[in-house]
Image (cartoon, rainbow, N blue to C red):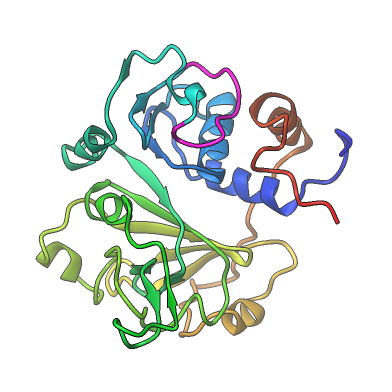
Amino acid sequence: MTDNAPANPLEILAYIISAQIRDHTIVYVGTGLPMVAGILARFTHAPNITMVYESGGQDPIHGGMPWSVGGPFTWRKSPTIMEMAYSFGQCYNGYVDIAFLGFAQVDMYGNVNTHMIGDNFLLPKARLTGSGGNNDLTSLAENMVLVGLQTPEKFPEKVDFITSVGHLRGGNTRKEAGLLGNGPVAVISQCGVFNFEPVTKRMRVKTLHPGMTFEVAQMCTGFELLKPEGEIPLTPMPSPEIIEILRKKVDPAGVFTSLPSA
């Protein structure tokens, strides 16, 4: 890939995720594009964030793209290194402002399934990875951003199993269940960026990516999407300068942002 090549879908997604990060916040980082997004945010619009890696590394000095949250670059000159359980404790005690999570399914209220596909727990159509730290993050972090592919099967009206609670059944049901934080505040897919209507907590279109229409986004969804009033904004795309930073400083080896070759 040449430096002036157009941004590929993974680079665009990394940029859109990074745009959710505000300066002077504490960011909980998992393996993959969230690591790319966090480092990119630090190099661009959010130089004063504190990055907390899932394995326990605290705010390392960037030295290269980690291959996972257990990679040595997540500890490079960190002021402190803790065990994974303590990183979840940081969430519980309010020291994490934003975290990112993938999913196998997400429903209209932002509930996430990473357990199973099917309606029979003992005989599922597919057994998935389970929770890991997912439920800890959605239950405890101040704000959650969900990232994944949008299809009717992956965006059903009701997930087959609630691994990680979003807004539960909508309204105030999340808080009534005793969970901390604001729950999911955004969902990012190949169609656009979605948020949640403040009263019902139903998923709502925030922006659509260039070339995407509401009708196509709705076709990719297994429930009725809510629309904002007026014209739906376009999702901002990365500038050539940001793509150059991404390729030369953040992930020069393309660990997470290069597409598989044929």
**Looking at the picture, does residue 100 appear above or below residue 250?**
below
Left or right of 175, for residue 202: right
Looking at the rendered image, the quarter that the C terminus falls into is: bottom right
**Residue situated in front as seen by the camera: 40 or 130:** 130
**Looking at the picture, does residue 229 appear above or below residue 188?**
below
**Residue situated in front as seen by the camera: 234 or 61:** 61
| 67 magenta-colored | yes
Left or right of 158, for residue 229: right
Residue 237 visible here: no
Q: Position of residue 95 (x, y in %)?
A: 24, 33
Looking at the rendered image, the quarter that the N terminus falls into is: top right
**Looking at the picture, does residue 5 appear above or below residue 251?**
below
Give the residue at x 42% y 49%.
100
Left or right of 79, for residue 41: right
**Residue situated in front as seen by the camera: 189 or 215:** 189
Residue 215 occupies which quadrant of the picture?
bottom right
Residue 208 occupies which quadrant of the picture?
bottom right
Give the residue at x 54% y 44%.
32
Q: Position of residue 175 (x, y in %)?
A: 15, 62
Q: Which residues are magenta?
A: 61-70
Residue 172 occupies which quadrant of the picture?
bottom left
Furthest residue toward bottom:
119
**Residue situated in front as seen by the camera: 90 or 72:** 72
Give the residue at x 50% y 75%.
154
Left or right of 45, for residue 243: right
Q: Position of residue 71 (x, y in %)?
A: 49, 29
Residue 213 visible here: yes
| 11 magenta-colored | no
Furthest residue toward front:
123
**Looking at the picture, does residue 54 appear above or below residue 216?**
above
